[in-house]
Amino acid sequence: MTDRTLQPIAEAWRWAMECAGDGALAAADWLARDIDPGCTGVFDLLADHRASLDTLRQAKSAFKTMRVAGETPADRQLAARLYAVTIAAALLRHGELITTQSRPAIIRALHGVEADDRLPPSLRDIASAARHVLELQSAPAAEG
């Protein structure tokens, strides 16, 4: 076998090993690398300040589907968290709210991300910053 024929086998083996640990995270990483082949996984994709709005829209769509189709409650919860962080990243980096959900619903979802210590601090920070922006935008204007 040549290195070229071993490449697909190596990729399949790597993916299988990732699945053995956390299937939902492995699936999210696989989706992230499919959306952006230059990223190392979902956490890298969502924390990357260079991610385009189109990339974030694709990620949001993938995580939205994963949120409904996940095999276990834990899978669906991870997908919901990633979905919320994707919306937060688009808001912070591109000034776009890429959802039709209500602001209170998004704020609640971002609170959930902030409280989830299974997620890396970089994603929790994105959620916190976006929640702050949304709360400021939702606050009634001060009379002066």
Image (tube, grey):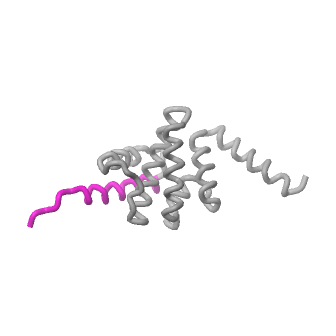
The span shown in magenta is 121-144
Q: Residue at x 52, y 43 (%)?
A: 65
Asked whether 128 falls inside the magenta stretch, the response is yes
Q: Residue at x 43, y 65 (%)?
A: 93
- The quadrant of the picture occupied by the C terminus is bottom left
Instruction: Indicate the position of residue 9 as horizontal and vertical percent values.
Output: 79, 48
Residue 81 found in image quarter: top left
Q: Residue at x 74, y 50 (%)?
A: 11
The residue lying furthest to the left in this view is 144
Instruction: Indicate the position of residue 56 as horizontal and vertical percent values.
Output: 50, 58
Instruction: Indicate the position of residue 89 as horizontal and vertical percent values.
Output: 44, 59
The residue lying furthest to the top in this view is 72
Instruction: Indicate the position of residue 143 as horizontal and vertical percent values.
Output: 10, 63
Observer-nearest of 55 and 19: 55
Asked whether 123 falls inside the magenta stretch, the response is yes
Give left or right: position of 111 versus 78: left
Observer-nearest of 134 and 69: 69
The residue lying furthest to the right in this view is 1
| In the image, residue 50 above or below residue 30 | below
Q: How many marks?
A: 0
Give left or right: position of 129 versus 39: left
| In the image, residue 66 above or below residue 53 | above
Q: Residue at x 50, y 43 (%)?
A: 79
The rendered magenta stretch, by its main secondary structure, is classed as helix
